[in-house]
Amino acid sequence: MPSPFPTSLAVSDAITHYRQLHELTVDELAYVLLMLGHPISADALAEMERCARPVTVDDLVAIAYVLDTTPAVLLSHIPIDMPEPEGPFATGLPSDVDPTELRAWIEGKTTLDRESRVRWWEERAGRLRVRSAHHEEQLQGAYAELRELGDLAVQEASAPPVQRLRWRIQDGEHALSQSEVALALTEHRLDNLREGA
C-alpha cells in the first residue's frame, strides 16, 4: 500500500523549493551538476520536480550539494501546502513520526525504537522548557523597561526608542506563545509515546 504522504513528492517539492531559493533555473542547475561530474539533463530535473521521475540516492546527494543543503533536509522536507498526513510520512515508519523526528532519524541523531523515541522527545521537551524560560525572562525585562518609562512611554509613544521597546514586547510575546505551544505539543506527543509503551 503506498504511503499517504509519498516521500518522492516531498523530495520533488524540496528540489524545486531550494532551486528557486538559490534563484537557479532548471537549465542552470543541470549545468552545475554537469560541471561537478554528475550530469542530469534539464528535462530529467524538470521530471523530478514534477514527481514524474524517481530521484536516485546519487542524484539526491549531488543536488543537495549544489543547492547548499543536505540529503536529510531534502528527504524530510514537508511542502508548505501539504495537508497533515493521516499516516506515516514514509512507507514503513510508525504513523506518529513527525517531520522533526524524521529528520533526526535520517541524520542519525535517534533511532525509532520506542525507548529512543521517548528519550528524544524528552530531550526536545527539555530544550523547549529552557527556550520558554528564556523568552519569559526577556519579556519580563522588556515589561520592566516599559514600566520604568511610566508616563513618558505614553507621552513619547511615537519616539523610536519607545516603538522599539513595544516591538520587542510584541516579538517576545509571540516567541513565548510559540514556544509554549511547541512545548505543549511535545509533551502531548511524549505522553502518547509513554502510554503506548
Image (cartoon, rainbow, N blue to C red):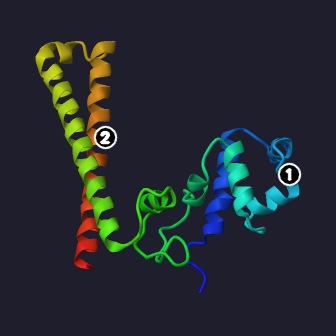
For label 1, the SS is loop
Residue at the spot of label 1: 39
Residue 135: quadrant of the picture: top left
Q: Which image quarter is the N terminus in?
A: bottom right
Foreground residue, 42 or 60? 60
As drawn, 61 above or below 190: above
Question: Which residue is more in the foreground, 172 or 159?
Answer: 172
Left of 82 or right of it: where is 196?
left
Residue 45 in picture, x, y percent from top left = 80, 56
Place of residue 28 in the rendered image (x, y in percent of width and height, measured from the top left): 83, 42
Specify the amino acid type for callout 2. Answer: Ala
What residue lies at 17% left-to-right and 21% top-to-bottom? 146
Q: Could you tell me how far apart the alpha carbons at marks 2 and 1 are, in whole angstroms?
A: 44 Å
Q: Is residue 91 visible?
A: yes
**Which numbered disc covers residue 58?**
none
Is residue 159 placed above or below 3 in the rendered structure?
above
Q: In the image, what residue occupies the spot 65% across and 46% down?
A: 18
